[in-house]
């Protein structure tokens, strides 16, 4: 799969309102969930690895793991059982906790691919904010996400299956 095609998949995956999402923003808030603030997102994201599955409306979902450098750099991998691709770009957190990723060649506007984060209990979810808006719609679908920090003396989780890496030539 070409890097341009991967960028398209990443754009759709980080902002997709896929049918696999667990619930809507409104349903999560009605159950006592909370939208995370700008400061909460910055604290969780800076120096962490963001992981999740990006559900696609065309059933071409993929898994991703992005290392989020404190200075705003982003590097990682996206993969399916058929392919794997390295990803590089940047991340920002803007007004109202809007988390955005910026990846070269992704078909996005200048603000990047943006989502709000929500938490209920220990579960963390992202909901895409429509282009030009700083907030996800109440009916927006949620996709499970995780910010992970690797403790000193441990090893990071494998970024992708080995078989997929050999197919990305």
Image (spheres, rainbow, N blue to C red):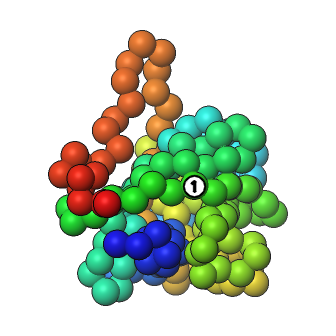
Left or right: residue 74 versus residue 85 is right
Q: Is residue 32 visible?
A: no
Tell me where residue 109 appears, x and y as whole percent. Answer: 71, 81
Q: Quadrant of the C terminus?
A: bottom left
| Residue plotted at (58% across, 59% down) | 117
Left or right: residue 101 versus residue 21 is right
Quickly name the residue at label 1.
88
On screen, 140 above or below 64?
below
Picture quadrant where residue 91 is located: bottom right
Left or right: residue 21 versus residue 126 is left
Picture quadrant where residue 78 is located: bottom left
Tell me where residue 83 appears, x and y as whole percent. Answer: 28, 63
Tell me where residue 31 appears, x and y as whole percent. Answer: 47, 63
- Extreme-right residue of the structure: 95
Element on which disc 1 rests: strand
Left or right: residue 164 versus residue 30 is left
Of 23 and 27, the residue lying toward us:
23
On screen, 18 above or below 47?
below
- Extreme-front residue of the structure: 169
| Residue plotted at (67% across, 47% down) | 73
Q: How many marks?
A: 1
On screen, 76 above or below 62?
above
Are there few (<14), some (14-19), or many (20+) residues within 10 Å of tag 1? some
| Residue plotted at (65% across, 40% down) | 69
Of 102 and 118, the residue lying toward us:
102
Of 73 and 145, the residue lying toward us:
73
Q: Quadrant of the N terminus?
A: bottom left
Q: Is residue 29 visible?
A: yes
| Residue plotted at (56% across, 38% down) | 48
């Amino acid at each position: 799969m070409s890097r341009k095609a991967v960028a398209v998949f990443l754009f759709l995956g980080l902002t997709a309102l896929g049918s696999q999402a667990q619930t809507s923003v409104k349903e999560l808030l009605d159950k006592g969930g909370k939208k995370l603030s700008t400061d909460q997102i910055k604290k969780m994201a800076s120096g962490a690895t963001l992981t999740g599955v990006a559900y696609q409306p065309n059933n071409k979902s993929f898994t991703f793991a992005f290392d989020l450098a404190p200075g705003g750099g982003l590097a990682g991998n996206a993969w399916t059982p058929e392919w794997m691709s390295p990803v590089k770009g940047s991340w920002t957190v803007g007004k109202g906790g809007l988390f955005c990723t910026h990846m070269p060649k992704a078909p996005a506007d200048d603000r990047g691919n943006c989502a709000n984060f929500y938490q209920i209990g220990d579960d963390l979810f992202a909901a895409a904010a429509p282009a030009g808006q700083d907030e996800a719609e109440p009916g927006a679908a949620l996709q499970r996400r995780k910010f992970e920090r690797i403790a000193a003396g441990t090893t990071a989780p494998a970024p992708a299956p080995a078989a997929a890496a050999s197919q990305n030539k």
